[in-house]
Image (tube, helix red, strand yellow):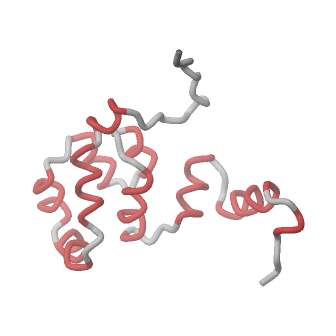
Amino acid sequence: MHNKVDPIPGTHIFDGAAARKGYALNAMCFSFNLPSNRQQFLEDESAYCARYGLTPEQRDAVARRDILGMIAAGGNIYYLAKLAGIFGLNVQDVGALQTGKTVAEFKQFLLDQAPQTQISEA
């Protein structure tokens, strides 16, 4: 028996429906594993998005650099990380966006979650 768990308010569950909805966006982001594709995106973003058949919602979120909008449009964070990198965002930047914190607050939040014996000043 499967018990459905209520999502945390403001989160998007990446399930089969989200995977179908975000297929084009995620396929495009996967293409960024190749440096030449990242360059093509930077040279003509609109044409690159059209090449993958992004929906208007997805294209708008990409144009606005709206990572949360991309997640709402079916984007999977593991694929979106490649696109975020093109925009100059790192994983901590995206984590801050997802939690509504500043980057400094998000970093402190992560540190607060770790057992004190695992934190190093390296």
Residue 57: x, y in percent?
27, 40
Instruction: Residue lying at the far bottom in this picture: please name it.
Output: 122
Q: Nearer the viewer, residue 39 or 23?
A: 23
In the rendered view, tell whether residue 13 sits above or below residue 35.
above
In the rendered view, tell whether residue 117 sits above or below residue 73.
below
In the rendered view, tell whether residue 71 sits above or below residue 91.
above
Instruction: Residue lying at the far right in this picture: please name it.
Output: 116
Instruction: Residue lying at the far top in this picture: please name it.
Output: 1
Q: Residue at x 28, y 61 (%)?
A: 30
Q: Is residue 119 left or right of residue 25?
A: right
Residue 6: x, y in percent?
58, 22
- Image quadrant occupied by the C terminus: bottom right
Q: Is residue 4 left or right of residue 63?
A: right
Q: Is residue 39 left or right of residue 10?
A: left
Q: Residue at x 26, y 50 (%)?
A: 25
Q: Is residue 94 left or right of residue 80?
A: right
In the rendered view, tell whether residue 116 sits above or below residue 57.
below
Residue 104: x, y in percent?
71, 64
Residue 29: x, y in percent?
29, 59
Q: Residue at x 21, y 47 (%)?
A: 24
Q: Residue at x 35, y 35 (%)?
A: 18
**Number of numbered discs overlaid on the protein picture:** 0
